[in-house]
Image: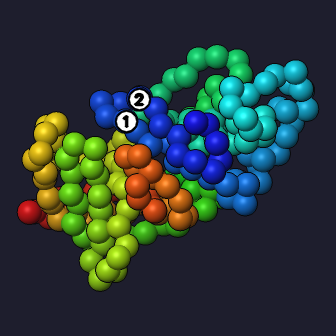
Amino acid sequence: MRSLNVLILGVLAAQSIVFGSANAASVPDDVLEQARAYAKTHRSEKPPRSQSLVEEYASGFFAGFIHGAYNGVLSGDDAFATAYAKGAARWKQGPDAQQRTFAGYGYQRIEWTGLWTAGFETSLFEPDGQPGLAAWLDFLAGSGAALPKTEPGPHFLELRLRLTGYLSPRGSYGHLGMHGRELFATSVQVLGN
C-alpha cells in the first residue's frame, strides 16, 4: 500500500526494507511543491491505490530517499517512480540535505545507546533510560554497521549498540506494522552482547 498514512513495504535488500510512512502534515514543503506540479501536468494519471497523485509522489520521494543510501533503482514513469528517482538524488546531496529531508517528514535526529533484538521478522531497538519506547530499527547503507546475520527461525540476536539516526513520528512500522516508531540508523557502533 503506497499511502501517506500506512506503512510501505518493499523488497529492495536481503530483507524487507521499510520505506516509512508520512502524513500530509509531515512532508517537506519542497516535496509538496514538486508533487503538486507533477499532479498538475499528469492529471490523467491514476495512482495504483486510492490516493491522490500528490500522496503517491510524496510516498515515492521518501522511498527513494531512504533507498538512495543503497543506490536503489525503480523504473517507470508514474508518480511513484518519478519521485523515487528525485528522492534518491536528494540522499546523495549529503548529510545536511538528509537531515532537512528527515525533519520535513517529521523524523527527529537522535543519538542513543540501547539493546537491539534481531531475528526472523524482528528488528527492535530499545534505548537505555526510556522505558516503553521501542522502535523498528533499519540500518541505512554507510552506517558502519558490521552486524552478524540473523537466520530464519526461533533464534534471536541481542546486541548493545550506540547509534545515531532518525526517529519517526508515531505510526505503524516494521513487520506487520506492529511498532509505533521506526529508527533509521546512520551511524552504528556495536558495544557487545
Q: Which residue appears at 68% of the width and 58% of the height? A: 26
The residue singled out by tag 2 in the image is 11
Residue 134 image offset from top left, x and y in percent? 35, 67
The residue singled out by tag 1 in the image is 16
Left or right position of 45 against 168? right
Give amino acid for label 1. Answer: Ser
Callout 1: helix, strand or loop?
loop
As measured in the structure, the alpha-carbon distance from the residue carrying label 2 to the one carrying label 1 is 5 Å
Determine the image quadrant of residue 90: top right
Left or right position of 186 against 104? left
Mark 2 neighbour class, 10 Å CA radius: few under 14, some 14 to 19, many 20 or more: few
Quadrant of the rendering where the N terminus is positioned: top right
Q: Which residue appears at 35% of the width and 76% of the height? A: 132
Q: Which residue appears at 35% of the width and 54% of the height? A: 137
Residue 80 can be seen in this image? yes
Q: Which residue appears at 16% of the width and 36% of the height? A: 152
Left or right position of 45 against 19? right
Callout 2: helix, strand or loop?
loop
Residue 83 image offset from top left, x and y in percent? 67, 33
Quadrant of the rendering where the C terminus is positioned: bottom left
Q: Do the residues labelled 2 and 1 touch (CB within 8 Å)?
A: yes
Give amino acid for label 2. Answer: Val
- Of 79 and 47, nearer the camera is 47
In this picture, is 110 found above or below 141? below
Residue 101 can be seen in this image? no
- Of 21 and 102, nearer the camera is 21
Of all residues, the one furthest to the top in this rendering is 76
Of all residues, the one furthest to the bottom in this rendering is 129
> How many numbered marks, from 0 up?
2
Determine the image quadrant of residue 61: top right
